[in-house]
Amino acid sequence: MTATILSGVIGIFFLVGAIMQLRCRGPIWSAEYLSASVRERKKMRSVRAYRWSGLQCFLIGGAFLLFMIYGLTDLTPFLYAACVLIALLVLCLLRSCVKAVRRSTMRKPDAAVLRTGLDDEVDE
């Protein structure tokens, strides 16, 4: 019963966070935003980033609330629905992580070339 109540509290917390994100308030809760530098974070504060983060928070909160309902009723459709939300969340998180890694790997070679001055050399 304690786990059921705890999952309900966590679910409500994340749903409130999702509402804040969808209203473009507060920090953006995504891997892409958290891995960015301070200068890049200012550029990333867009409606699109807030909506993406809001979607992730909504999926987390919905999954926890469905787990709570499953704990109270023992009806397996709620468990299956929570698993579907978790699978969608994993896909969203993978997309965010891949995008963050792409951005950081694209940025590093340029910085290395600028530091070493290799952009003037010609390979033969």
Image (cartoon, rainbow, N blue to C red):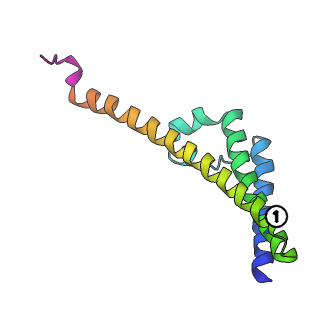
What residue does disc 1 label? 77
Relative vertical location of residue 96 with respect to residue 78 in this rendering, above or below: above
Q: Quadrant of the C terminus?
A: top left
Residue located 80% across and 69% down the image: 76
As drawn, is 12 to the left or to the right of 45?
right
Looking at the image, which residue sits at the far bottom?
Answer: 1
Of all residues shown, which one is farthest toward the front? 76
Residue 56 placed where, x, y %? 69, 49
- Residue 63 falls in image quadrant: bottom right
Residue 36 appearing in the image: no
User: In the image, is residue 69 part of the stretch drawn in magenta?
Assistant: no
Q: Nearer the viewer, residue 118 or 42?
A: 118
Q: Residue at x 75, y 67 (%)?
A: 10
Is 123 covered by the magenta stretch? yes
- The reply, left or right, for residue 42 in relation to residue 35 is right
SS category of the residue bearing label 1: helix
Q: Quadrant of residue 74?
A: bottom right
The quarter holding residue 71 reads bottom right
Question: Which amino acid type corresponds to the residue marked 1 in the rendered image?
Answer: Pro
Answer with left or right where residue 117 lies relative to residue 9: left
Q: Residue placed at 75% from the left, 79% from the top?
A: 3
> Which residues make up the magenta segment?
118-124
